[in-house]
Image (spheres, rainbow, N blue to C red):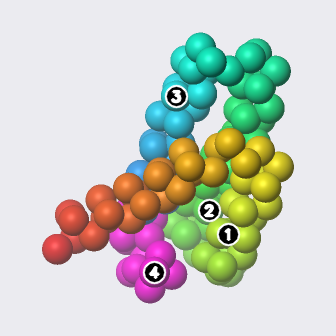
């Protein structure tokens, strides 16, 4: 679905995703039920996803090369497999970002 968005909305989606992943970071570091080592592990892989999201924004905006959404989502799945506990936060960030784009472009 993301791949079918026009360039302008695709960039907006990834900007929104970046913001929502920042919120997910706050959820993790403020979770008193997690040990410090659990927080570090989850934040490490969430940071890798955030790093790729900012790169994806640049690729989409400047159109320097192709980076298909399928490849991007596969990369996210890889990092979530390394830290399964971030899966719900990442999925929520993706879903809410897409819903937000659909709501404002209509």
Front of the two marks 2 and 3: 3
Is the C-beta separation of discs 1 and 2 under 8 Å?
yes
Residue under label 4: 1
Determine whether the residue tagged by mark 2 lies in a helix, strand or loop: helix
Q: Going from the N terminus, do you reach mark 4 or mark 3 first?
A: 4
Residue under label 1: 72
Q: What's the residue at 48%, 58% (across, down)?
A: 94
Question: Which residue is at the front of the view, 46 or 58?
Answer: 46
Is residue 9 on the magenta stretch? yes
Name of the residue lying farthest toward the bottom? 4
Label 4 crowd bin: few (<14), some (14–19), many (20+), radius 10 Å: few
Residue under label 2: 56
Residue under label 3: 27
Question: Which residue is at the front of the view, 20 or 90?
Answer: 90
State which quadrant residue 34 falls in: top right
Where residue 47 sits: x, y (%)? 70, 39
Is the C-beta separation of discs 4 and 3 under 8 Å?
no
Q: Residue 30 vs residue 13: left or right?
A: right
Where residue 11 sits: x, y (%)? 45, 64
Which residues, given as a range, are shown in magenta?
1-12
Label 3 crowd bin: few (<14), some (14–19), many (20+), radius 10 Å: few
Label 1 crowd bin: few (<14), some (14–19), many (20+), radius 10 Å: some
Q: Distance between the residues labelled 1 and 2?
A: 8 Å
Q: Going from the N terminus, do you reach mark 3 or mark 1 first?
A: 3
Which quadrant: the C terminus? Answer: bottom left
Determine whether the residue tagged by mark 3 lies in a helix, strand or loop: helix
73 vs 57: above or below: below
């Amino acid at each position: 679905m993301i791949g079918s968005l026009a360039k302008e909305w695709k960039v907006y989606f990834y900007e929104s995703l970046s913001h929502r992943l920042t919120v997910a970071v706050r959820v993790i570091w403020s979770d008193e039920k997690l040990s410090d080592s659990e927080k570090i592990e989850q934040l490490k892989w969430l940071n890798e996803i955030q790093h790729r999201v900012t790169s994806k924004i640049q690729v989409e905006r400047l159109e320097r090369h192709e980076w298909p959404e399928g490849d991007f989502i596969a990369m996210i799945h890889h990092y979530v497999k390394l830290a399964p506990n971030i899966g719900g936060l990442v999925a929520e960030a993706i879903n809410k970002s897409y819903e937000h784009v659909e709501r404002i472009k209509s």
